Image (cartoon, coloured by chain):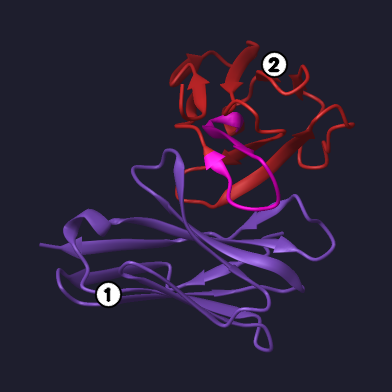
Amino acid sequence: SQQGEEDPQALSIQEGENATMNCSYKTSINNLQWYRQNSGRGLVHLILIRSNEREKHSGRLRVTLDTSKKSSSLLITASRAADTASYFCATHRMDSSYKLIFGSGTRLLVRP
Amino acid sequence: GAGVSQSPSNKVTEKGKDVELRCDPISGHTALYWYRQRLGQGLEFLIYFQGNSAPDKSGLPSDRFSAERTGESVSTLTIQRTQQEDSAVYLCASTAGAREQYFGPGTRLTVT
């Protein structure tokens, strides 16, 4: 079964607006990662946040992690049309240091 | 090459035929993963290789699926007697540790 569930499933925004995607998971984790996928092909790693971290930034990306609520959010600021893609969260569980469990993804459309 | 490569990029096959998918991981990456992604869905873990350790085959959906990897090199995923429900994108990823995974572009398999 899926460890992570993203919300919303789809998001449409205007270029320049911020996009927020949420991820919930079920078991204790080592770390949580966010990936982007264009056109249904290979995924690209965006950012990794460890279980003892609460917030992390990378360029226009901001990730938060709330282990008490077992949830994470990905914020993309000042969105661009090129940000249009599917975004997936993935977790490394405490009981399995090598296996990444992916959520079902959020499909983001940024309208120019 | 600098990244993970997969071949073929697309494969159309008739129901009942066998197919073999190939993955070349990043040199030096000890871990290799295979995932399946159905249209509009998240990634399903299939199998994991770590060095010369026994692979984790827990995600393989049936005995028609098998995979091999020699040492830390190329891996092949074989699907025997393909069925229409096997149609999906098959993604390979490699990693040097319990951190981000580097994905190949995938093989889109269509079973007619």
Image quadrant where residue B48 sits? top right
Residue shown at the point (65%, 12%) measured from the top left: B18
Badge 1 crowding class, 10 Å Cα cut-off, few under 14, some 14 to 19, many 20 or more, is some
The amino acid on which the numbered mark 2 sits, given as a three-letter code, is Arg
Q: Which mark is residue A64?
A: none
Quadrant containing the N terminus of chain A in the rendered view: bottom right
Three-letter amino acid code at disc 1? Thr
Report the magenta residues as a range.
B86-102
Q: Position of residue B84 (x, y in %)?
A: 57, 28
At horizontal 66% and vertical 41% (from top left) the residue drawn is B96
Which chain is mark 1 on? Answer: A
Which chain did the renderer colour red? B
Above or below: residue A103 compared with residue B54: below
Co-location on one chain, circles 2 and 1: no
Check disc 2 and report its element: helix, strand or loop.
Answer: loop
Q: Residue under label 2, please give it.
A: B81
* Residue B60 or residue A17, whichever sits in front: A17
Seen in the image, is A1 located left or right of residue A32?
right
Query: Which residue is identified by label 1?
Result: A77
Nearer to us in this view, B72 or B93:
B72
Q: Which residue is rendered at x = 57% and y = 29% of the image?
A: B26
Q: Which chain is purple?
A: A
